[in-house]
Amino acid sequence: MTQLDISVRNDHHRLVLSVSGPINSYTFTDFQEKVYKAIAQSDAAVDMERVTALSSAGIGVIMTAMEDAETTGHGFVIVNPSEIVRLALDSTGFGDRFPIVKTLKQA
Amino acid sequence: MTGRRAEAAVVLEAIPSSILSFEDFIGSLAFLSPRERSRLKVAGGEILDNIVKHATPVDSGRIRARASRRGDSILLGFYFRSPSFAAFAAGLVGGAESASAEPLFDPARRRWRGIGLLMCRNLASRVVFRPGESMDRIFLEFEGGK
């Protein structure tokens, strides 16, 4: 069974989280912890190219991170989401509200 | 794809980590396109998560998931038995009048609620809950090719 893997690196002024594997009800707490920690410290970009599933729990983390970013004044973007991530975000009915960029350079 | 028929099933333990086995099962279904697999994985994962959370204890501790294709119609069914799921399911499949149409933020847990319900409604053409004396069933119907 595939597990979630998240690596964090510094990229100039921001933290980049590279996520691979499924973000679901079983794995999302690790995603939640790392995303909230990153957005509290600096601008954050979450690379979701290799995410294989995204549940409502994971989307809730993204929505809360967007609010935290507004509160702290930090930037928050989703980078190059996989097809299933786009599908999951769009399936909420408000997919256009998520800050999506194709590459880190666009962030 | 008219006339194409195929099906597959898996038995899952009624525990949170079964979502991983479910995702692997859907990912293995060669009779679905990648996009169809993604829709079943996302919507079905939400249903399974709710069964595990709200139907506990599930009799026998097992949930059976079955995916089938009949032409352009795709059906994903969950089969289990729980005395406690009916009340929750009334809100899940009962339409906009029985549940909040918008997600709500739970500030105490810093969690959004109601997103999964929206996702299922938008991904599946129909969500049906059929309680029974010996077996409860939840069906998600999808239009193939989308």
Image (cartoon, coloured by chain):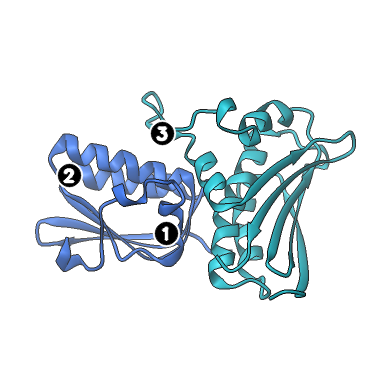
Chain colours: A blue, B cyan
Q: Where is residue B128 in the image (x, y as percent from the top left)?
A: 71, 42
> Observer-nearest residue: A35 or B97?
B97
Q: Which mark is residue B78?
A: none
Q: Mark 3 points at which residue?
A: B111
In this view, B146 is above or below A61: below
Same-chain check, marks 3 and 2: no
Q: Mark 2 points at which residue?
A: A41
> Amino acid type of disc 2?
Gln
> Amino acid type of disc 3?
Arg
**Side of A50 relative to B60 (left or right):** left
Chain bearing mark 2: A
Determine the image quadrant of residue B42: bottom right
Q: Which circle, 3 or 2, is nearer the viewer? A: 3
Chain bearing mark 1: A
Q: Which mark is residue A85?
A: 1
| Label 3: which secondary element | strand
